[in-house]
Amino acid sequence: EPLERSGVWRFRELLPFAPDDKIVTIGEGQTPLHSSAGVADYIGLKPGNALLQYEGMNPSGSFKDNGMTAAFTHAHMIGAKRAACASTGNTSASLALYCGMSRLMQAVIFIGSGKISYGKLSQALDYGALTVQIAGDFDDAMHRVRQVSKQLGIYLVNSVNPFRLEGQKTIMLRVLESLNWEIPDWIVVPGGNLGNSSSFGKAFHELKQLGLIDRVPRVAIINAAGANTLNALYNELGVRWNGGAPDVSAIDSYYAELDASAKRADTIASAIEINRPVNLMKCLRALECCDGVVREATDQQMLDAKARIAANGLGCEPASAASVAGAKILCEQGVIDPDERVVCVLTGHQLKDPTATVAYHSSDQNEFNRVLGSRGVTTAAFANR
Ligand code: F0G
């Protein structure tokens, strides 16, 4: 694949760590920015003001390819033969695809038991990744993969890897490019491991320092209500980056309480079912840089938003819809003004997680109960579509 056809590497002056002949690209990042009047109406914005950055159109079906091409390239530069990640499904699908296509490395992936949608699991298996199921959830799998990769010298591609974030910066470069470098008022993004939001903050910080833009957009990060560590720390405990001196003891005691309560992340949006985000500190810095806000969206709010996004022609997975659900909440609260221009990032494709979608639209009560029954989700809110 020519470098100029990659939506990541045609910006390589802004991520200058790789010699051209070492870059591993599969044509990632050729993703569109769509304006949707229907989604604007749903959020509460003027018709032209809802813009959707559709990262589901990447080769593996999620935004992860933006970061994976960069981390994978670095792994190749240092001669790695095996690469590993813990994943809720999309990172692993992406890693497995880069391994399969390049034949440069063996993929080793760690997933929580029963915590991955079949669309994503099928990608990893079919592309030939060595797939290890861990008793526990993503946070447990993350803990294990860090130990194992350190012990065995396996290259780790989770977003603790700084090269991942370098690649993901380009999502925002493409947004700005699509807008002819006019700065939107808001970027709204789901928050899981907080890699995306951290990389966006870094992108805007660097562009401003380079004098390529004169102001930065505000950033809104949306947690799932059932996996809301960032929201709790930021809004309930008032934790801030604080110029590089965040209140670490508040964070530590939050996690200590979490451990003591044995409370687990729990949301239908399995992609962001994470209680210990590895990029928390970088994300706090991004929030400071971009005058950020944090909110949480319930499973109901995400699924309602997802159906409305898809009814306007853009299919995404439940976690992705957190962005639109969050924008709607912020509009209702008067934080976002209808006159403002809002970019919502749709992080993963609809086909990643068909189970939740079918259950949501199903008139079969058994199917609905099997997937959504205990979550207090109803489809009634959507009956008058
Ligand atoms: N949206 C989707 C579709 C995701 O797969 C993820 C993360 C996120 C949002 C959250 O992004 O971590 O940058 O805040 N998925 C990871 C995975 C954890 O393993 O695939 P983040």
Image (tube, helix red, strand yellow):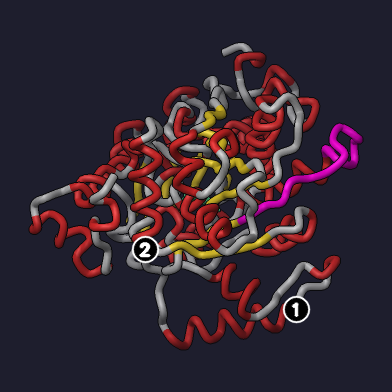
Q: Quadrant of the N terminus?
A: top right
> Which residue is located at x 28 percent, y 51 percent?
382
Q: Residue at x 15, y 62 (%)?
A: 369
Q: Is disc 1 in contact with disc 2, using a CB cutoff of under 8 Å? A: no
Q: Secondary structure at mark 1?
A: loop
Which mark, by number, is residue 247?
Answer: 1
Residue 130: x %, y % from top left: 36, 43
Q: Is residue 60 left or right of residue 356?
A: right
Residue 193 showing in the rendered view: no
Which residue in the structure is indicated by mark 2?
Answer: 267
Q: CA distance from mark 1 to mark 2?
A: 28 Å
| SS state under label 2 | loop
Measuring 43% from the left and 51% from the top, which residue is drawn there?
319
Instruction: Classify mark 1: residues with Cα within 10 Å, few (<14), some (14-19) or many (20+).
Output: some
Task: Give the magenta part as a residue range.
Answer: 207-220
Residue 127 percent coordinates (x, y): 35, 31
Residue 109: x and y, percent? 42, 47
Q: Name the amino acid type tagged 1.
A: Asp
- Residue kind at label 2, given as amino acid type: Thr
Furthest toward the top, the residue is 2
Q: Is residue 217 shown in magenta?
A: yes
Residue 274 in view in this figure: yes
Structural crowding at the residue carrying mark 2, measured as other residues with C-alpha within 10 Å and reported as few (<14), some (14–19) or many (≥20): some
